[in-house]
Amino acid sequence: MSDDTKALVRSTALRLFRERGYAATTMRAIAQEAGVATGNAYYHFASKDHLVQELYLDVTREHATAARAVLAQGGDLTARLRGVMLAGVDAFAEYHAFGAEFVTVAIRPGSAASPFSAESGESRELSQGLFRELVEGASPAVPPGLRDELPELLWLAQLGVTLFWVYDGSPGQRRTRTLVEGIAPLIGRLVKLSRLPVLRGASEDVLALVRAVRA
């Protein structure tokens, strides 16, 4: 019964987020719509932030399913990155009207909805795993020096694209799609150039900086 109630509260909250947005969806409204006591809703989810994180997990799963169909076709890093990023834009599309609200929640320090929070571990690992598949399956192969670090860097780039998408008011978020079409070949070229001795040192410096920031 407890698991059933949790699933009911979760599905009700995600539906209300889609229909009403974050601000208009209170824990009380979720409980009333689900037909449970407000205290019961809080028992399963400590705050709305935790439910936003559940929404992010759902969208990440949708993104992963669509992106893996793209990755199954093979291709070089540029084509695979373009396909995966565009699949992400499509997965988030129905939430665009409320995107700014969700970002406001996610960037709050300590928020469970933050993509860097402990609560977001499952969705973060799923998304980063997708970029690992992207890098590992690219042909020609990504240089060994970049192969371990590049998936996380691409995931961070995806977060940046998502932030741009939130504030993109063009029809169908055309400007975001144009951004992806430009970013993918640029990253692909930079990765190719990293093989050259003259740029290998700069590449290693960037990776060292990433490791230092992460530590």
Image (cartoon, rainbow, N blue to C red):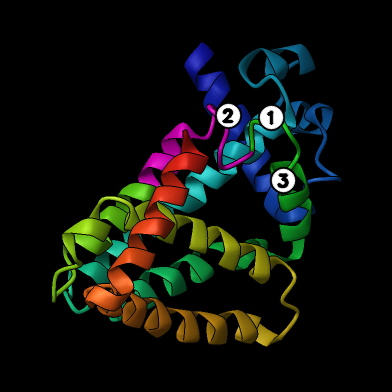
Q: Which residue is mark 3?
A: 16
Task: Give the x, y percent position of residue 119.
Answer: 54, 28
Task: Give the x, y percent position of residue 36.
Answer: 71, 19
Q: Examine the rendered structure and indicate whether residue 179 appears above or below residue 137.
A: below
Measured Cα–Cα span from mark 1 to mark 2: 6 Å
Q: Which is more foreground, mark 3 or mark 1?
A: 3
Give the magenta range. 114-126
Q: Examine the rendered structure and indicate whether residue 185 appears above or below residue 215.
A: below
Measured Cα–Cα span from mark 3 to mark 2: 12 Å
Precedes in sequence: disc 1 or disc 2: 2
Specify the amino acid type for callout 2.
Leu
Task: Give the x, y percent position of residue 167.
Answer: 75, 70
Per the image, label 1 sits on a secondary structure element best described as: helix
159 horizontally vs 166: left or right: left
Task: Give the x, y percent position of residue 186.
Answer: 42, 82
Give me the residue at 72% from left, 44% from top.
Answer: 107
54 horizontally vs 186: left or right: right
Precedes in sequence: disc 3 or disc 2: 2
Specify the amino acid type for callout 1.
Ala
Q: Which residue is mark 1?
A: 34
Q: Nearer the viewer, residue 24 or 176?
A: 176
Q: Is residue 121 magenta?
A: yes
Give me the residue at 66% from left, 12% from top.
Answer: 43
Contact, CB < 8 Å: mark 3 with mark 2? no
130 horizontally vs 153: left or right: left
Contact, CB < 8 Å: mark 1 with mark 2? yes
Precedes in sequence: disc 3 or disc 1: 3
The answer to whether one can see residue 89 in this image is: yes
Q: Nearer the viewer, residue 188 or 75?
A: 188
Q: Which residue is mark 2?
A: 8
Which quadrant of the view contains residue 175? bottom right
Q: Nearer the viewer, residue 76 or 188?
A: 188
